Image (cartoon, rainbow, N blue to C red):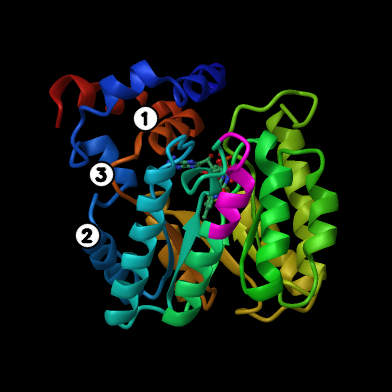
Amino acid sequence: MALLREPLLLLSRSGTVKKLVSTLPVSAGIVRSYVPGETTETAVEATARLVGDGLTVTLDFLGEDTLDAEQADATVAAYLALLKKLSAAGLQRQAEVSVKLSAIGQALPDVGHKIALENARTICRAARNAGTTVTLDVEDHTTTDSTLGILHDLRKDFPETGAVLQAYLHRTEADCRALAHEGSRVRLCKGAYNEPESVAFQDKVEVDKSYVRCLKVLLSGQGYPMIATHDPRMVEIASSLASRYGRAQGTYEFQMLYGIRPEEQKRLAASGETVRVYLPYGGEWYGYLMRRLAERPQNLTFFLRSLVSKK
Ligand SMILES: Cc1cc2nc3c(=O)[nH]c(=O)nc-3n(C[C@H](O)[C@H](O)[C@H](O)COP(=O)(O)OP(=O)(O)OC[C@H]3O[C@@H](n4cnc5c(N)ncnc54)[C@H](O)[C@@H]3O)c2cc1C
């Protein structure tokens, strides 16, 4: 099954397969298990249900790698509409937003970095006015320097902006040290892209060891760690490290993706932990779905069945 990870991640960036797979309706079983719907309304309704279960949420308007400035503007507009609706529904304290910089212009030739920074600033301002925050997702390693640079600039005006770091990258333990300061919200995940040996650990055991080293840095530091994993071992290790470093519940949080280990999400919340669910919505679910399949190739049969039956 591990052998399928790389081909599935390569397919996540294939335009031809994207066209075929995107004919699936969002209601198709496999898509719906990871994405609650296409519209802002369905996303806000799903958020309200999760909040009712004692969870908190971060919403992602799906889309990535855009080479079209108008598309980037449309994504910014979608976030502004979402933030208005979250605040109108009184959900701004429990729900924030996650933004992929490549969806708001980072990949545009020459001007990408500048446009993504301006667009991210617009979303951060709207989030602050709505009473909530933004976290900047991270994508493949070729964008890490630009993303952390944009984070640094945004934090001058919006210090509440969350960072994301990927434990599979060799550089990440050092990035954790640089970002473990007071007021700094940092999400630690393992990493979801196909990365070369020159920059990333390839072996799952090495990635897990790096995840634990990074957890130690973040949990013993002064910031607010956001522990993003479904891995039962990592959750257990994070909990014991939090007690070892004298961290009270609420001075860090766990995060998991929508539809993955929902019972565990509720169990952790019932034990007093803050648990945030990453909730993606919108029509551009292809790349996101392929990354989830790469993590769990057991779901391939389910996926192929959905593709044939279109249900
Ligand atoms: C809140 C959040 C935000 C994220 N943001 C980013 C980001 O910005 N950039 C980025 O590169 N990556 C991001 N990721 C993805 C992350 O990098 C991993 O690819 C993903 O979380 C799988 O790693 P894992 O820690 O769950 O461990 P794994 O080693 O993949 O899985 C451990 C165990 O978790 C369970 N599990 C994992 N996946 C599934 C599944 N699909 N269905 C059912 N059970 C499953 C299984 O029990 C599995 O054995 C994010 C993840 C989360 C939770």
115, 291: nearer the viewer: 115
Is 239 positioned to the left or the right of 76 in the image?
Answer: right
Marks 2 and 3: in contact by CB < 8 Å? no
The kind of residue on which mark 3 rests is Arg
Mark 2: which secondary structure?
A: helix
Q: Earlier in the sequence, mark 3 or mark 2?
A: 3
Mark 3: which secondary structure?
A: helix
34, 264: nearer the viewer: 34
Q: Is residue 169 above or below residue 220?
A: above
Which residue bears the numbered disc 2? 42
Which residue bears the numbered disc 3? 32
Name the residue at 51% across, 73% down.
Answer: 125
Say if residue 258 shows up in the picture: no
The kind of residue on which mark 2 rests is Thr
Which residue bears the numbered disc 1? 299
The magenta stretch is 109-118
Marks 1 and 3: in contact by CB < 8 Å? no
- Mark 3 packing: few (<14 Cα in 10 Å), some, or many (20+)? some
The kind of residue on which mark 1 rests is Asn
76, 223: nearer the viewer: 76
Name the residue at 38% across, 45% down.
Answer: 70
Image quadrant where residue 309 sits = top left
Q: Position of residue 194 (x, y in %)?
A: 61, 27
